[in-house]
Image (cartoon, grey):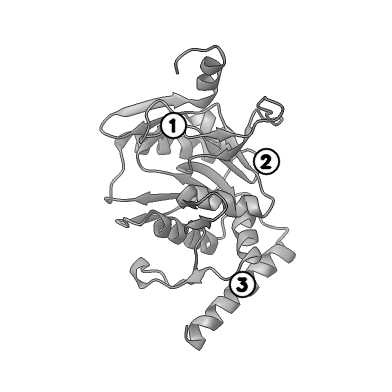
Amino acid sequence: MDAENRQLIDNYIANVYKRLTQPDPKITKSLCIGTPFYEHKAFSPYIASLVRLLQCCAAANIPVSSVNVDGDSFIDRSRNTIIYMFLESGATDLLWIDSDESWDTEGAFNLIRSPEDVVCAGYPNKNIWGEMGIVPKIYDGKLVPNLYGQIEIERGIGGFMRVRRHVFDQIIAADPTLFYFDTGTHQPGPFYDFYGPIQDYENGVIIRDDWAFFRRWQNRGGKIWCHPDITITHYGTEGKKGNYKEWLVKRSKGETA
């Protein structure tokens, strides 16, 4: 790495430490919606749901901006690029929404208002229809929700997830070695590899993408929460709709979800 790029990274890290140690008391809550568009297009139900959510945020006086990446086939790079643009935007919260989803406005708004640092939705997994893509944490054989009805999870799906800005700053501060530059993103950088693979030597597996981000936050002592009472339809060649709370109730009764 040449001296100029090294200096850019050093300056970036210095700004991260400044944000963590000298937070601006004047900053008010604002939302940045981040969506990767693989083929430069979104499903029409995504657009309809987005309009309703924007109207809800406007009524609640929550400023909303958006960032997106078009046509990048690398999931980890597209998400890293969106985080870079989010951190440059000045917004306090990043809301990931994949372009192949629709959602109910009330559930989404309650997720956004969660006091937790990282909170995601449970919804049908396109690779295994009927499964909700959530691995909950179990305490004494039970799910233990917080005061807002959200449950702590080991792993989940990050395609509908709200993350607070300081989460990214804390991950960077814990390991400032994962910066890189990439001219293919059309952004100056430097970028941080939040979603890059992690080699889990103990279990002999490679942790990728959403799970890699979760692991990096959990290694910092952070928790991942799921807001179960939100109905999301996940589209492939057909749409599969699911509400994680209703799915859990059916499973507890021995019913097929």
| Left or right for 249, reference 174 | left
Q: Amino acid at mark 2?
A: Pro
For marks 2 and 3, the one nearer the N-term is 3
Q: Amino acid at mark 3?
A: Ile
Pick the front one: 77 or 155: 155
Pick the front one: 17 or 154: 154
As helix, strand or loop, the secondary structure at mark 3 comes to helix
Q: Which quadrant of the structure image shows residue 162?
A: top right
As helix, strand or loop, the secondary structure at mark 2 comes to loop
Pick the front one: 213 or 228: 213
- List the residue tagged with mark 2: 115
Percent x, y of residue 244: 51, 26
Q: Is residue 4 visible?
A: yes
Query: Between marks 2 and 3, how big is the CA–CA gap?
Result: 26 Å
For marks 1 and 2, the one nearer the N-term is 1
As helix, strand or loop, the secondary structure at mark 1 comes to strand
- Above or below 212: residue 241: above
- Above or below 169: residue 208: above
Count numbered badges in the picture. Answer: 3
